[in-house]
Amino acid sequence: MTESHSSAPSHDEFGLIQWIRDHVAGQSSLPAVSVGIGDDAASVRLAPDQARNSECLVAVDMLLEGVHFDTATATARQIGRKALAVNLSDIAAMAGTPIAAVISVSLPRRVSSEFARDLHAGLADLAAEFDVALVGGDTNVWDGPLVVSVTVLGRSPASGPVLRSGARAGDAILVTGDLGGSLAGHHLDFTPRVRESRLIGDLVELHSMIDVSDGLAADLHHILEESGVGANIEAAAVPISPAAITAAASANASDARSPLDRALSDGEDFELLFTLSNDDAARLLNAPPCATPITRIGEIIVEPGCTLLDAAGNPTPLAPSGWRHQ
Ligand code: ADP
Ligand code: MG
C-alpha cells in the first residue's frame, strides 16, 4: 500500500460518519447551522441575521504519520504544507475564501526541534501564499507517531457556499487540472485550487462542487448521492496526469492498472470537480479565467448511478472505487 492509497477512507469510516450525521441530525435545525456534516466544510452563522457572504466556513483535516505521509520520504516542510493545503482545498471546494487556521501537533519525542520548526515553516509558507492567518493551535510531545490536525476558517461567497448536493440533470461535469498523479508525489506538493475556485465562481453559477481527495469516481459519487442524480462520464475526456501514464508504463505486474484507471480511482489529486449549466460550461471553456486547465468530462443525468462511456459510446458501470478491466 502506498501513502496515498491508504489515506482513502475505508467503508467503516464512511459508515461511522453517516452514523454521526444521523445522530446529530436534530442539531441541523439550530439557527447557527447553515451547512452541517456531509460536505467539504461546514458553514456557520455567527449572528442570526448574517448575510451569506459573512457566514463562517469551517473545515478540519488530520494527517497521520504512516497513513497520509511517511517521515522517511516526506520532509517536515512538506508535511506542514500538506496539512494546511488539504484544508484550503476543502474551503476552495465550497467556493469560499480561507481566512485563518489553528494547528494541533502531536510531536513524537524522537524528532528534533529543527524538525518541529520546519513543520511550522511549511505551514507558514503556504499560509502566507494564501493570506491565511495562523492564529493558534496546540502542541503536545508524546511517544506516538506524528499527527498534524489543521482547522481552517473561511468566508462563504456572497451567493452562499457551493454544496455537493446542488447538481441538476443536464449539468455539465467539469474538472480542473489533471488526475492520477498523486502516487508520484504530487500529493505532497499540490497547490490548493483556491484561486481557481474564486475565478470560476465569479464567472459562472456553480451548481455543485467537491475537491478530489478520495479519487474522481469516489468523489463524483458523493455529488451524485447528495444530489440524487446520476452521471455519464466520457472516458476519453478524463484529463490524465503524465505521471499516471509514466507510472502505468513502469508498474510491475502487481499493479497493472491503466493510466485511466489511475486517474479515476487514485485519491489526493485535490482538483475541483464541479457541475454547472451547459451554457455556463461553454462560457467557461471558451474563455477560461485561469491558467489551470478546465475540462468537461461528462454530464449529469436523471437516472441514479454512474456510467463510463468509451470512445464508441459503449457503457460500463463506474463504481465509487473506480473502474477495472473486466
Ligand atoms: P473530506 O474528504 O472533504 O475531508 P470527509 O470524508 O473527511 O470529507 O468527511 C465528510 C463529512 O463528514 C464532512 O462534512 C466532515 O466534516 C464530516 N465528519 C467526518 N468525521 C466526523 C466526525 N468524527 N464527527 C463529525 N463529523 C465528521
Ligand atoms: Mg473535500
Image: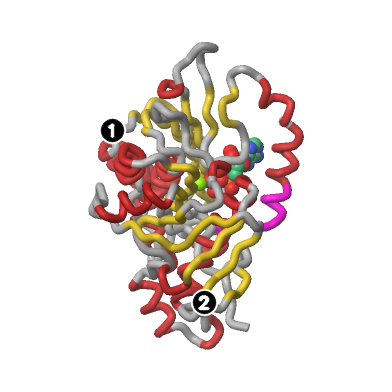
Q: Residues under labels 1 and 2: Cα distance? A: 46 Å
Q: Position of residue 95 (x, y in %)?
A: 41, 38
Q: Amino acid at mark 2?
A: Gly
> Against 134, is 278 above or below?
below
Q: Amino acid at mark 1?
A: Asp
Q: Position of residue 282 (x, y in %)?
A: 34, 53
Nearer to us in this view, 305 or 44: 305
Residue 181, by quadrant, is bottom left
Specify start and end residues of the magenta stretch as a single range.
7-15
Q: Residue at x 45, y 83 (%)?
A: 251
Q: Is residue 53 toward the left or the right of residue 46 in the image?
A: left
> Against 253, is 151 above or below?
above
Which residue lies under the disc numbered 2?
A: 313
Which residue lies under the disc numbered 1?
A: 131
Q: Position of residue 247 (x, y in %)?
A: 41, 78
Mark in front: 1 vs 2: 2
Q: Residue at x 38, y 26 (%)?
A: 135
Q: Residue at x 47, y 25 (%)?
A: 56
Instruction: Name the quarter showing ligand 1.
Output: top right
Mark 2 crowd level (few <14, some 14–19, many ≥20, 10 Å Cα) = few
